[in-house]
Structure formats: structure tokens, C-alpha cells
Amino acid sequence: MAHGQRLVGLGPSQLRRWLLLFFLTLLIPSGVLIQQSYSQLKWEAFHQYRVQAEELSTRINDRLMRLITEEEKRAFTDYAFLVVAGEATAGFVQRSVLSSYPVNTSVPGVIGYFQVDDTGRFSSPLLPAPQDQAVRYGIADDELNQRLALHVRLQQILSENLLVQSSGSGRDRDRLKQRLDESPRRESTAGLSSSGKGARIDSTMESDSADQPQAAFDQLNQADAKRQLEKKSSGSKLLGRVEDLKLDRRFESRLAEEQAAASPAQKLQQNEQRSIRKERSVLPAPASIMAENETDAGEPLTSQGGVRIHTFESELDPFEFSLLDSGHLVLFRKVWRDGRRFIQGLLIEQQAFLQATIADLFRETALSGMSELTLAYRGDLFSTFSGKSPKSYQSRATELSGALLYRNRLAAPLSEMELIYSVRQLPAGPGGRLVLWVAITLILVLCGGFYLLYRLGLRQIELARQQQDFVSAISHELKTPLTSIRMYGEMLREGWASEEKKRSYYDYIHDESERLTRLINNVLQLARMTRNGLVVECKPVAVTELLDGIRSKIGSAVERAGFEINLRADEVAAKTVLMLDGDSFSQIMINLVDNALKFSARAEIRRIDITATLERGNQLVLTVRDYGPGVPRDQMKKIFRLFYRSENELTRETIGTGIGLALVSQLATAMGGRVDVINQQPGAAFRVIFPVSAANDQCGE
């Protein structure tokens, strides 16, 4: 009983608090363990993809370095239209490899090659000097027009970026338009020379340069504050700054030491590979070519061993790279010859170059499915690639999100360009799904266990409270009749009762003893059910016999309570035979009648109706109806619970222990039937239903 008292003292709110504490005690360590496991899997996946990003960056860098190395191998003379092939003493003049049209090069997106001398003269290997001799080199008029257009486009791009100065009068554009408007059919170069000499565009167009016409190229790689301000004010198409990236850097700190240790060695190695290169070059003397053109103007140039050549030594600086304000890329170098400086380089379309050298390699890897690759130049973001679609570019730095996976600078001359990998969605690795399922299962088990323990605890608290109420009720139910029996017995023994009252005293003692007998039988039946010792012996019994037995057992008690009993059965039901346990059935009906008498004691109609009917489905229904207040709707299912009472033990007005209706329900179930209650107007009707056809099979199960 001490355990029951402790349960009764524990309220639902206290139970919730204790269970919640127990739940958190299990949940918090489990959650920390799962979080640590999942974080470790995330870290391993991050490291795996970072290794892939490093390998991809190396591949991109190697590919770009191969392209630049091929360009650095080009001789100073390749940027001219004509070069000398063979030995210097016995060579012959031929067209340069860069004079082909369309431009033939391994660098993707190249617009064309150019050269700027120390006086600011712009030239390209696309056009010969003089241009009216183009037919001698196998260049048709249509192709010459296209070469002229590309030549002017190169100069315009450099002019827009203030690298060279365009002609102030605009005669270059006028001459190009005049050249394009001329008839494409010409019979000979001589006719062009005599009639259209003024329409020729010189390949070394002069410009009104300043004292240092090449100074703009020197300033390209000077990332000072003034240049950054000019770039922003010019409306260049940049995504923003690297500092504007809202990237999660929680993994970066764990890799800081490794990245810091690798970067200096890599940069040192890259710088060691680049140095000034010296070469010995030969070019045909311009005067020699002009003299030859005047003597053999009508013959194609093949091999001219007598052409005078000019031999010289030149120093070639490594290539430099820059992103122009117009969005074009420029790769250029400085060449020193006879105390003069020349700028040689090539203009590149940005997207075509990046697509072929970076984006295509990026989309071939697994990184494209979970990350984005952003390119930065001097801290400015200017392009981003994603594996979602070939044209998935962002327009602002704030649109780039995720965790920083890897960032690395390319080798010189692209050292100002940085590759930034950001993770859109980092997979947790092979065991990540298992950890998630374990976490979900654990949470469900803990929540389910918490709920079940809470419900079980509430039932135990309620059961302990009901048991205490039962003990209180049974004590009251036993003590009151025993006290009355003892009192009337002493009065009869002492002869204090008259002859008229002796009869009523004997009747009262008899009724109270029967009530005690019923109460004790209920308690014993409850004990047997608690020990799973309830055994019913079903025998065939006619309904009429059952009703007669009920009348004999409860008739006198009903009449003494001042009630009238009404038993009836329809003709079909009266002939029905059921397989029932007679004692159990009698206990069911006695408890139902006793319950009706208690709760309808103040009813205006003092009658108990017991009826037997055979309803559809071959079911026999025995109904016990009273004319009392009925059963509240919210208690119709609760009244069949063990120890349940609709009234508080301190305020209840009816006698009882709360086990009568529970015994009715369990005994009916043991014999294959069921019991329910419905409200009438007035009163309540308790119905005990037995299926006739299945009675033999279900009784006793």
C-alpha cells in the first residue's frame, strides 16, 4: 500500500516533469553523439570534395599554363606579317603563323594578335605592308575586307580601354567603309594601286600619342585605389567583391594551417619557372621588300634568297595577364630590341575562354553537382559557373551562398585570378543517410516511450487512486450493514422489539445479509479475474428459465425497495436457448438491477423493466431499464471501467464500490456477449447482447 500511496501523491504535472527530465537526460547525450557523428561525416565529405577541388584547380592551372607556354614560345618576329625562314644567310620570306585568317590558335576565344611599338603605332599580323600587295600573298579582296574589319576591331577594343589612341579624324573607319563599299571584283593589283591608292589603310597607323604611349600597359596590373574607383564608375560588369560573399567558413579554420603551408611553396615554384628570355631574330628589311615589289609586282612571292634581312637580338619578358574594363581579357608581353620596347599580345573573349578552359573541366567533375565555381580577379568577382545549367550565372555577390570549400590562385601570369569553390549542398557521405535514419528512429522511440510511460503512469496513478477509493467504499459498504445487523440482532436478543416490529427487523437483517453476500461475491469474482482465474461453464439454458430465475432472486429486494419489476419476452425470444453460465448470468442481472435501484431511488416512476428480444443478426438482447436521471454522455464508456464511480467518494449519495458494472462487462465478454448503455426519456437502458448462432463457439473463450 505504500507504493500505492506514493503513486497517489504523485500528480500528473509532477509525472510529466519527471518523465521530461528522464527524456532530456536520454535525448541530449544521444543528440550530441549523433551531431558529432554527422559532423564528422560532413567533415570527411568536405575533405573529400576539397581534394577534388584541389585536383581540379591543378588541372585548370596546368591547362592554362600549357596554353601560355605555347604563346611564350612564339618569336618576336611572329607578330609581323612576313618572316624569314631558314638560315639568316640563305633564308626566304614567308607569311607568319599568326597571319592566318581566321585566327588559328590553341587559345580558346582569341580575337586576334597585336603589337604596339614605342611610338604608339598599332599593328597586327593580319595585314601586309603595304596592303595593296595583299594579292601577292594569296589574299583575296573579300578576305582582305574581313582582315581589315578584325584589324580595326582590335584597335577599337584597345582604344576603348585606353591602351592605344584611335585616329582623331576617324579616317580609319571611313577608309574601312570605303574599302567595303568597293566592288569585290578587281582585275589586278596594279589597277587598285593606280586608282585607289588613297583608300589603303596602313597597318602601322600613327596616333597622336603622349610622351609615353605604352604607359597604359604598365598601369594595367597596378591595382591601386584610383584604378579600382575608375573601374566601378565605368560600369564594368562585376558581381562584387570577394569580401561581399556570404559564405559559411566553419570548415576553413580546420584547413588554415594546411592551406598556409601549401600556398607559399606553390607560389615560389610558379615564380621560379618564369624568367626573361633572349632570342636572336631576323626580319626582312622593309626597303628590300618594297624594291622587290616594284620589280616583280605581278608574280606571287615564293622564295627570295636575295632579299636583304635584318638580324637582331631581343629580350622577351614573361606574359602578363589583365582583365579589361570592357570585359575582354588581354595577354601581353614586353619585348626589348635595340633599345626600343614593343608590346605584343592577344585579345581574348572572356566567356569563350573561361568556358573552354575552366567551365567545361568543372562540369565534368562531381563538384558541379554540389558546388559553384566563382572566378575573382584582384578581389573582384567577375564570373561564376554552376552545374545546374550551362548558362547559370549570378549577377550579384549576395546571390552566392553556401560553405566555402576551397580557394586558390592560379600560377603567374594568372596569379591575380582566384578560383573560389562554394558548396551549395554538402552531402554527408555514405554513412550520412544511416545516421539520419538512426536519429529519426531514436527520436521516434524516445517520443513514443515518453508518451507510453506517461500514459502508463497516469493509469497507475488513477488505478492507485481508485484502489484507495475502493478500499474506502468497501469498508463503508461492509461496516454499515454489519452495524445495522448487529444493532437489530441485539434488540431482538434483548427483547426490546415488539411482535409487530420483529418481522420488519428480521426482513432488514435478511436483506442486508443478502447485500453483503452479493458484495462479497463481487469482491471474490474480482479477485478471480485479477488472477486470470475466471472460469465460466456454459450450459444450454432457455430464456424463459433465465427470466424466472431472475424474478426469484431479485423480486423481493425490488419490492422492499418500493419498486415494481416488469419482466417480458417476445414469443421468439422466449423459445431461444443460449449457452450460458447460469451463476455468471444471474450475477450480471443482479448487478444491473441493483445499479438501477440505486440511481433511480428518487425517480417519479418507480419501476424496473427487464425485456428479452431477438433482433436482426440473430442476437438476443436482454435490457434492464430504469426511469432515473440516465448516464451523462461523457461517462457512458467510463462506467464499465474497474473502480470507476461518477461521484466523488466524499460527496457521493449512492452506495457502491465501483466494481459492479466492470464485472458485468467482463462476465458478458467471457460468455461471448457484450454490454452497452443507451439513454432513454427518462432513464437509462443497459443492454446485454448474446449472439445466438455463435454462442456455443464463443462461450468460455
Image: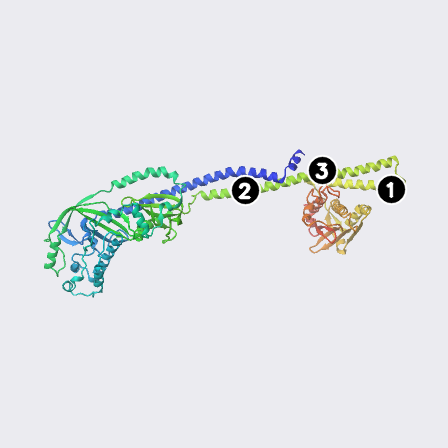
Could you tell me the amino acid type at mark 1? Arg
Could you say whether the residue bearing mark 2 is in a helix, strand or loop? helix
Query: Disc 1 vs disc 2: Cβ atoms closer than 8 Å?
Result: no
* Crowding at mark 3 (Cα within 10 Å: few <14, some 14-19, many 20+): few
Residue to which mark 3 is pinned: 471
Q: Earlier in the sequence, mark 3 or mark 2?
A: 2
Residue 172 point in image, percent of width and height:
21, 59
- Separation of residues labelled 3 and 1 (CA atoms): 33 Å
* Crowding at mark 2 (Cα within 10 Å: few <14, some 14-19, many 20+): few
Residue 314 point in image, percent of width and height:
17, 46
Q: In the rendering, which numbered label is found on residue 503?
A: 1
Does residue 70 appear anywhere in the picture? no
Residue to which mark 2 is pinned: 445
* Crowding at mark 1 (Cα within 10 Å: few <14, some 14-19, many 20+): few
Q: Residue at x 84, y 38 (%)?
A: 488
Query: Disc 3 vs disc 2: Cβ atoms closer than 8 Å?
Result: no
Name the image quarter holding residue 591. top right
Does residue 595 appear anywhere in the picture? yes
Q: Nearer the viewer, mark 3 or mark 2?
A: 3
Residue 318 point in image, percent of width and height:
23, 45
Name the image quarter holding residue 223. top left
Tell whether 161 sits left or right of 682: left
Could you tell me the amino acid type at mark 2? Val
